[in-house]
């Protein structure tokens, strides 16, 4: 039973790790996250948010995408490690099990409400 649980935890963590890694790659290569309106892109690269003039909406967005990716990748790496940790620490920690579940549920809610079908399906899986 422990091996089945380890496999399911590892698969879950690997999915989040892959999604986070793809998100990071797509953030800095290609146009997958770019607006379809070229004029909007130009304005985003010129306009700063109210909080500071030290950045632009475009640069802040790139940073938000990257930090979001790092968070998903960190979650995936930590839970992947814990899934195969020899003492089975994860399986005995209700806190870590609950924390992982809450994180995945929160990501599923965000994906459903604000993103698109691929992240929602991946996180739900």
Image (spheres, rainbow, N blue to C red):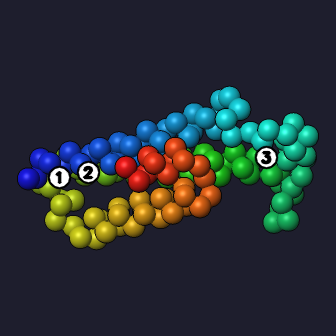
> Where in the figure is residue 22, as x and y percent of width and height?
52, 36
- Of tags 3 and 1, the one toward the viewer is 1
For marks 2 and 1, give the CA distance.
6 Å
Can you identify the residue that label 2 sits on? 9
Residue 101 placement: quadrant: bottom left
> Where in the figure is residue 55, as x and y percent of width and height?
81, 52
Is 75 left, or right, of 26 in this rendering? left
Q: Earlier in the sequence, mark 2 or mark 3?
A: 2
Which structural element holds mark 2?
Answer: helix
Number of other residues with Cα within 10 Å of mark 2, as a class: few under 14, some 14 to 19, many 20 or more: many
Q: Does the CB distance between marks 2 and 1 fall below 8 Å?
A: yes
- Picture residue at 49% right of the left edge, 51% below the top: 120
For marks 3 and 1, give the CA distance.
42 Å
- Picture residue at 19% right of the left edge, 49% below the top: 6
Q: Residue furthest left?
A: 1
Residue 7 placement: quadrant: top left
Can you identify the residue that label 1 sits on? 5
Q: Does the CB distance between marks 3 and 1 fall below 8 Å?
A: no
Can you identify the residue that label 3 sits on? 58
Is 43 left, or right, of 21 in this rendering? right
Number of other residues with Cα within 10 Å of mark 3, as a class: few under 14, some 14 to 19, many 20 or more: many
Q: Which mark is residue 63?
A: none
Q: Residue furthest top?
A: 30
Which structural element holds mark 3?
Answer: helix
């Amino acid at each position: 039973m422990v091996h089945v649980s380890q496999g399911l935890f590892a698969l879950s963590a690997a999915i989040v790790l892959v999604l986070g890694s793809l998100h990071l790659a797509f953030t800095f290569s290609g146009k997958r996250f770019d607006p379809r309106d070229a004029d909007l892109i130009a304005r985003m690269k010129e306009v700063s948010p109210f909080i500071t003039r030290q950045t632009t909406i475009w640069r802040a967005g790139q940073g938000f995408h990257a930090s979001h990716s790092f968070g998903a990748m960190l979650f995936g790496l930590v839970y992947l490690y814990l899934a195969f940790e020899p003492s089975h620490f994860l399986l005995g920690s209700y806190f870590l099990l609950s924390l992982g579940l809450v994180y995945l549920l929160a990501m599923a809610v965000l994906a459903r409400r604000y993103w698109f079908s691929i992240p929602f399906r991946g996180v739900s899986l």
